[in-house]
Image: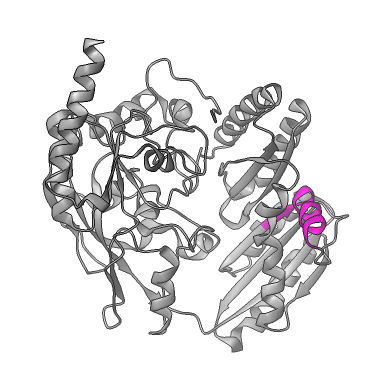
Amino acid sequence: MIGEIKVKEKLQTIVYDLAQHLPSERLLTAEHDLFSYAFDASFGIYKPDVVCQPTATEEVVAIVKIAEKFKCPLVSRGSGTSLSGGPLPVGGGIVLDFSLWNTKLEIYPDDLVAVVSPGVITSSINNLAEQYGLMYPPDPSSSHVSTIGGNLAENAGGPRGLKYGVTKDYVLGLEIVTADGRVINTGGRTVKNVTGYDLTKLVVGSEGTLAIITEATLQLIPKPIATKTALISFDEITDAGKAISTVLSSGILPAKMEIMDQHSIIAVEEYEPLGLPTDVEAILLIELDGHPKALNDEMKIVEDACLRVNARSIKIAADNKEAQQLWRARKLVSPAIVKIKPTKISEDATVPRSKIPDMFKRLKEIREKYQLHLVVFGHAGDGNLHPNIIADARDQEEMARVELAVGEIFQAAIDLGGTLSGEHGIGLMKSTFMESELGADGLHMMKLIKDAWDPDNILNPGKIFAEPGQRFVLKND
């Protein structure tokens, strides 16, 4: 009882100190508010003790210093779309909700640069850049709701990653607040910058465990003039895998190259009939971009490359409207599969392109071994597959099989020379598998960096590095 009283008194002191720096409407302590921040798009419910909604660097500094004083966990959060448990406050403490801090979105067209606050919605950056004939390439599927701060924390990718790379490839500089409340600027506004260690790239993708991002300077590029899309069907999924390497070795680099297996195709057709061939094992969706005079010739090369590896049929969109209809099939996969069962476990194991056929074989074996509804789609051009298991979280026996299957999916990717995550991040969901990929020494080196930046482990504790005795569990209670 004495211990509980001391904890309550400590929390009251923390809230009182926070109230000296934040207005009451941006300092949330009501039970219903706290539960709103207890989950993300993955699994588990972890209620914070207090939620702060900063809209200025000075406020973040004040909050961090209070957290450091009381050794209180501090977890950054954007829109809560994480699929790996990144923003879950597993140790309680303070959640920093950046979703209101969307006040700065500035485009500097002469420098091809954007400067943004952490709460800016990702798609808003590209939408504004397009008004200047520019583009912000990273395009995660959640870009219409996810914040740039969350994307930076997880180093988010997307379909355009094949040609244009991922979030880290477009970050020129950051303003960050360290675990002891210091404000540091990394990088700058120039494309070339080799002054000392690249702290910018270190912080991007660190999932809020090293520092808190309060502003980002992003690189923009000229927007391609035109695009051309094709849907290519394959009787054998191994041939679809071969087509990926064949196209890329033909001298063509598509902007997007997505794959859908037969289970995905059937789910979409049952959800919304689009005329997709349901008797094939896979389809590839390929988008080329560039100058319109070159695209016809490039698409002919793509056609020839796919036909050489036994493509059954090739449909080329006549115009943008038809192209959007073809891409609708890929966008409908997620809503379609959750109509089958309510719980979707979405992974993003990534393998070398040449190993995609082998990965599909392993996934088929896992599906049959555990008798699960497993569908596969994703960014085939860069090997970033999305094995999705559809289940019912209320069925404990089924979820036990799911946990075993997910573990084998991760191990299969590692065995084939791949990685646990291509874009979702490690967070809570994959932390227990880190040593399998990195080895004990590699993981130890990362932990040394964490300890140097955050010696009291107040920044997003429990993420990336598994706690002693922690095991992989899909928990949603």
From the top left corner, tell me how far across and down residue 364 is, in percent: 75, 36
Residue at x 24%, y 66% (from the top left corner): 192
Boundaries of the magenta span: 259-272
Secondary structure of the magenta portion, mostly?
A: helix
Figure quadrant of residue 148? bottom left
Residue at the farthest right position: 279
Look at the picture and state if 77 lies above or below 243.
above
429 on left or right of 147: right
Q: How many marks?
A: 0
Residue 262 lies in the magenta-colored region? yes
446 on left or right of 246: left
Q: Depth check: 91 or 331 in front?
A: 91
Figure quadrant of residue 107? bottom left
Residue 260 lies in the magenta-colored region? yes
Instruction: Indicate the quadrant containing the N terminus: top left, top right, bottom left or bottom right.
Output: top left
From the top left corner, tell me how far across and down residue 138 is, in percent: 45, 63
From the top left corner, tell me how far across and down residue 243 is, in percent: 71, 58
Q: Is residue 196 visible?
A: no
